[in-house]
Image (tube, rainbow, N blue to C red):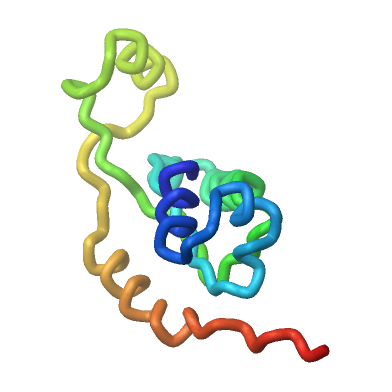
Amino acid sequence: MVVSLSVIAFIHGISVSQVLNGGIRNMPVAAFAVGISPKNPDPGAVSQAAAALHTAITPILPVASVVFAEKLDPAKLSFIQRKITERLKSPVGDFRDWDAIAAWARDLPGKMRPAPAPKD
C-alpha cells in the first residue's frame, strides 16, 4: 500500500501523510489486491481478503475494489514460503484472469470522476 499511496501523493503533489489524513477524500480511488484466496475452496476466503483490503486502506473509501487471483510459483518462493504453501495445501499455478482484470480496468474511468467540491 505504501507504494500506491506514494504514487498517488506524487501525482497530486501532496505528501503521503496528507493522503492518509484526508487529502485523498475528494479523489476517486480504486483498490485491488491479489492473492490465492479466489482459488480457496472456502467460500468466505474472498470476502475475508476483501475485508482485509478495506481495512488496510481505511479511511479511504474506494469507488471500486476487487480481489484477483494471482500466480503462485513454488520455484520462486523461499524455503519457508514453500513449506507454508505445502502445509496449507495452497493451489499452485497461474490463476490470473487477464480478461477479468482488463474488464475491471475498462470500467474504472466511468467511476473515477472527482467528487464535487464542498459548498461553503
Please provide percent x and percent y for residue 78.
Answer: 28, 14
* Residue 19 vs residue 93, the one in the foreground: 19
- Quick check: can you spot residue 56? yes
Residue displayed at 26% across by 52% down: 96
Q: Is residue 118 above or below residue 35?
A: below
Please provide percent x and percent y for residue 63.
Answer: 56, 73
* Residue 77 vs residue 117, the one in the foreground: 117
Q: Is residue 89 above or below residue 105?
A: above
Question: Could you tell me which quadrant the C terminus lies in?
Answer: bottom right
Residue displayed at 44% across by 87% down: 110
Q: Residue furthest front?
A: 13
**Within the image, what quadrant is residue 72 found in?**
top left
**Within the image, what quadrant is residue 117 found in?**
bottom right
Please provide percent x and percent y for residue 43.
Answer: 54, 49
Residue displayed at 54% across by 44% down: 45
Q: Is residue 55 left or right of residue 105?
A: right
* Residue 43 vs residue 61, the one in the foreground: 61
- Quick check: can you spot residue 43? no
Residue displayed at 39% across by 47% down: 34
Q: Residue furthest left?
A: 75
Q: How many marks?
A: 0
